[in-house]
Amino acid sequence: MEILDIYNQGIIDKIATLEVENKDIIYMTKWFTDRSEKYKILVAELNSQVVGWVALNPYSHRCTYQGVADLSIYIRRNQRGEGIGKALLSNIEKEAVKSQIHKIVLFTLPFNELGQGLYKSMGYREVGIFKEHGKIDNDVDVMAMEKILTN
């Protein structure tokens, strides 16, 4: 599963997630099948190969947050910075609106400048920094970003 390979690259590279152990096909299959139809997954292909993926995830189980989704986006290592992320974000935002999601939030590592450049170019704003919010090799800060979607 190419989505799994790309996700594991993000884990290994330590720039896009606080996960520290590679995932297997059982984990990814469960993640894929346990989703509500509301929370879309899109992939980008180049020459019949998946080069990136984006997913909307529930932000909270509380009903008051039904219009808010959490974002996951991962691009194949050798394809980063080539516009794939921008295309994926643009398309997932359209799907979000169709699913009555009006706001997307994401959490990024402050040193992931390429990712933050992408998010800012697409209208996401920095909400704040959670200090020492997670641990990869050492304590790491996590930046929260958000975008209000328009119809």
Image: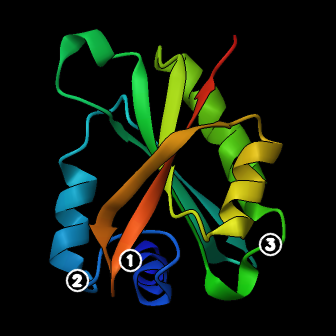
Whole-percent x and y of residue 95?
Answer: 57, 30
Which sits earlier in the primary sequence, circle 1 or circle 2? 1
Label 3 to label 1: alpha-carbon separation: 20 Å
The quadrant in which residue 63 appears is: top left
Looking at the image, residue 16 sits to the left or right of residue 149; the answer is left
Q: List the residue tagged with mark 1.
A: 4
Dot 3: what SS? loop
Q: List the residue tagged with mark 2.
A: 24
* Residue 55 seen in the current view: no
Q: List the residue tagged with mark 3.
A: 81
Whole-percent x and y of residue 131?
Answer: 39, 56
Q: Residue at x 71, y 67 (%)?
A: 113
Badge 2 crowding class, 10 Å Cα cut-off, few under 14, some 14 to 19, many 20 or more, is few
Q: Residue at x 18, y 47 (%)?
A: 34
The quadrant in which residue 91 appears is: top right
- Say what amino acid the circle numbered 2 marks: Asp
Q: Are marks 3 and 1 in contact (CB under 8 Å)?
A: no
Q: Residue at x 49, y 48 (%)?
A: 129
